[in-house]
Amino acid sequence: MPADRTTRPWALLVTLALTALLTACGGPDDSGGGGRVTLRYTWWGNPDRAARTERAVALFEKRHPGVEVQTSFAGYDAYKQKLATQAAGGDAPDVMQLDYRMIDQYATGGVLLDLREQSAVLRTDDIDPGLLATGEVDGALAGLVQARGTETFVYDAAQWKATGVAPPRAGWTWQEWADTMRELTRKSGKPGATDPGQSEDCFEVWLRGLGKSLYREGGGLGFTVDDLTRWWTFTDGLRREGVVSTARQTTQLDGTVENTALGRGTAIGDFNWDAPASGYLGIVGDGLTLAPMPSGEDGRPGQYFKPSMFVGAAANTAHPREAAQLIDFLINDPEAAGVLGASRGIPVNESIRADLVPKLEGFDRTVADYQDSVDGSLEAPPQAPPSGDSALQTTFSRDYDQVSFERMSPREAAENYVTEAKAELR
Amino acid sequence: MTTTDIPAATARRTPPPAAGKGAGRRREGAAWVFLSPWVLGASVLTLLPMAVSLYLSFTDYDMFNPPRWVGLRNYTQMFTEDPRYWRSVGTTLLYVVLAVPLQLAVALAVALALKSVRRAKGFYRSAFYAPSLLGASMSIALVWRAIFNDGGTVDNLLGTGGWVTQPGWALLAVALLTVWQFGAPMVIFLAGLQQIPAELYEAAAVDGASRARQFVSITLPMLSPVLFFNLVLQTIQAFQVFTPAFAVSAGKGGPADSTLFYTLYLYDRGFVASHMGYASAMAWVLLIAIGAVTAVLFRTSRAWVFYAGEETR
Amino acid sequence: MTTNVPTAAPGSQAAPRRPLPWRRVALHTGLLAALLVMLYPLGWLLATSLKPADEVIASLNLLPSRLEWGNFTTALDGVNDVSIPRLLTNSLLIAGGAVLGNVLSCSLAAYAFARLRFRMRGPLFAFMIATIMLPHHAVLIPQYVIFNQLGMVNTYWPLILPKFLATEAFFVFLIVQFMRGLPRELEEAARIDGCGPFRSFALVILPLIRPALITTAIFTFIWTWNDFFTQLIYLFSPEKFTLTLALRSFVDASSQSAFGPMFAMSVIALLPIVLFFLAFQRFLVEGMASSGVKG
């Protein structure tokens, strides 16, 4: 260290800066005086969902005068990274919306409160037990399911009709689907659908149609290199025939409906989840129709009802009881349900759903009808995907890119994927 | 305040003589006063997080559970078991070699042209800077994807097919997005040109030096510190290219991994796959690689960068 | 290698030459042609903000078939809870604070590195440059933890404080480069006149590096204004949101078709910085040329 004399000016400045810093930040306004409790509640969504949620939250605050709820929302991608950073920094919001793929990771990481601890104020009797269980991790109720969704083959009925091809029938098999796409392409001159080879979701539906699964109970892959090779050989063959979108179109998929082949107007149909398919409305128009996913050759359905959204509370919240009260209100209160409508999908609380469904209009109605049409015929959902799944989802489409750009054979790519997946799930 | 001081030129390389010790120490004290905000910021907000990330690079850390020490495993895995890692290295190097010279050349050319323009200077400056005001947002990425798509403007003009849809072309489309936003180096070049005393040109003109001669003898050497700055910074930034690639390929680095740049893959490992330990190791390898390249640049700078405030060797 | 000392080369012609008219015409033609190419994507952005939903992505035509002003009203609906003036004020507060901080702290640090002697100068300078070399994703979480420990999350401190502490090495290095280009005789003269380092910094050096300071100010303003990510991570309450954050974070691609409004948002968010740049770019021209310093 330099001599005392020389350090003095800078030591003084540091002291000054630190004092300024400490007085300036003086702590954020915490729960404040007067015994008022402040909860932070975050979700992802669009302005419509936000406006409805704000109104529901205002109702809650009226009902619980001692509680103030600070709300915040963002688009999904932004939300996901913000929440991860907050959680890693030990600063997760008191109440947060979660995706199916987040549950396992957040719960095993100790971020989430076991909601059963608050069963006195948080009722779950009106929720289907099977659906409720999808929010369980290691025996704790880490998240409460808010809505469910299932996959669909969505298509433009106007274009389809013009080709004269028979519309999809319930229970069609993958083989029938492929033949139908061939026919559509022959009649219309454009691909019938986006290449499903890049989609881990479609692969899962196909696997389940064979009686297999993406992941084994208790971890590990539920399929072999041979299975994946078969799937990719199947889809790659269709691509070579020109029956599904080209590699150059497929590689541009980014999770938005606009960038799908159907959204760009270069195909007649597409695979997607039911509720997000509403995005096609503005592009495709009223001809937008939902058909069930193809099933296995013996008629075994591969698609299933998947919880599409959860709500959870932070394990380190200072106000677990109030947080649980807020969740209970959002899920179970009829008045809140009246405000929220189907802005987070068809509600899971059965009495509220029975109340709400007849009143639905527009695309909400379409989704509800579609769900009714497949309800009862589907098999139980698998357990929540393991933490490694979010990485594998992108790996899956990356490896298939290598196939569709003809840089690897389906088998080479499948071997690659399985090796990576095993390392990921280790 | 009066200080007797040794001439700066000698002070640079030789320690202050014993006689000037008191003054030297006072001046050293002054230096630390000037540096104090930086010292505080660098230690608390930079060094500390850097040290943490260095530590994390030796651990298995998923952001939610406490980090678990794994020694060098992240590094060995990166170098020996991850072909995608090496592909990202190759892609990034290609990008650096392509984008940096191109962007600097364009920025310098436009800055020089703007210097000789007399009319509508402000208009040109603003118009050329306009693309850089945007940053690399989602919407500019979509514009880029439209222009460079199959059947898009570029395809129609050149008949090459879409650039963002073909593995062989996509990297070029991303590089062009960077080059297109050349506003920052251009403005820095302009500021550097402003700083060249007009007297030098007047004297040269009086001596009858040609424009080319003036450029070589006055503009280039006087601009060299700024040129060097732009070269170093653009190189560092090119190694870390993230936003344009993320935007244009929607975070996937496609088609067929052709724009999976180093930091894009790092982000993918860290925030998508939750392997923050692995991502930290990647970050430190990158730091060392960039550091080596920058050190080489600094070394060569002695031969070609001229500082008016310091004597030439 | 020896570097050219910038003295004029000997020659025969004595009179300063004026550029010929054809030369100026060629220059302007070239510049305008380059601009046309440069601004084409911006035109595309503007045009797309007025396209109806089924054309935003699907159509590869520049011009919309009909003008969809609804994109703009939808975009503004997204921020209806917080008033636009409030968001603007927040943005200006943060960007203004950042500009002040960067100009102040970076020029102080740069002066020390460029002109003063102190122990460890070389290694510290190398360290400063090294801080730009680590990808920021790797330090994001540790930084968040620090600001969280300091109780600064959901305040503007994480956005402004680092600028007052010269953490942006880009600008320190930039100003260093400009200072090193200044002739040393200036300070020698000042020193003979009795100026210490503080006075020669404030009275001699600062006025001379105005182009660098203005560059720093303009870049800081624009980059802070556009820095969606840091604002997203550190701000929680909507009433503290900035314009950029409010506009951009409300786009949710997962729930509905929102690309038209998103383009409209980009256009709206662009307006303030365009105005800022137009207002301040003219200061870039002033500087050394007008202050008449001899080399």
Image (tube, coloured by chain):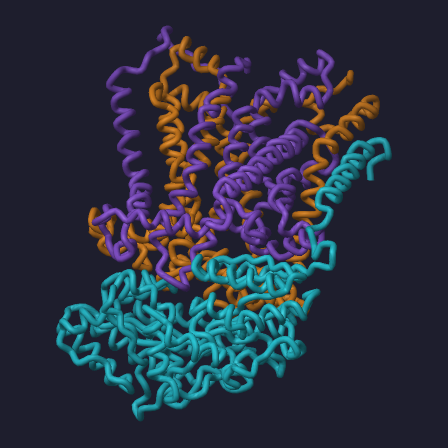
Q: Nearer the viewer, residue B111 or A308?
A: A308
* Whole-percent x, y for residue B39 in the image: 71, 40
Chain A: what color? cyan
Identified at 42% across, 12% down, the residue is: C10
- x, y percentage for residue C54? 26, 57
Seen in the image, is A366 located left or right of residue B157? right
Image height of A317 relative to A416, above or below: above
The chain shown in orange is which? B
* Residue at the (13%, 76%) spot, across then down: A164
Residue B242 % position (x, y):
47, 52
Pick whichever, B99 or C194, lies toward us.
C194
In the image, is residue A285 above or below residue A347? above
Question: Residue, x 85% and y 31% (percent of image)?
Answer: A5
Q: Quadrant of residue A148?
A: bottom left
Quarter of the figure with the C terminus of chain C: top right
Image quadrant in which you'd find residue C30: top left
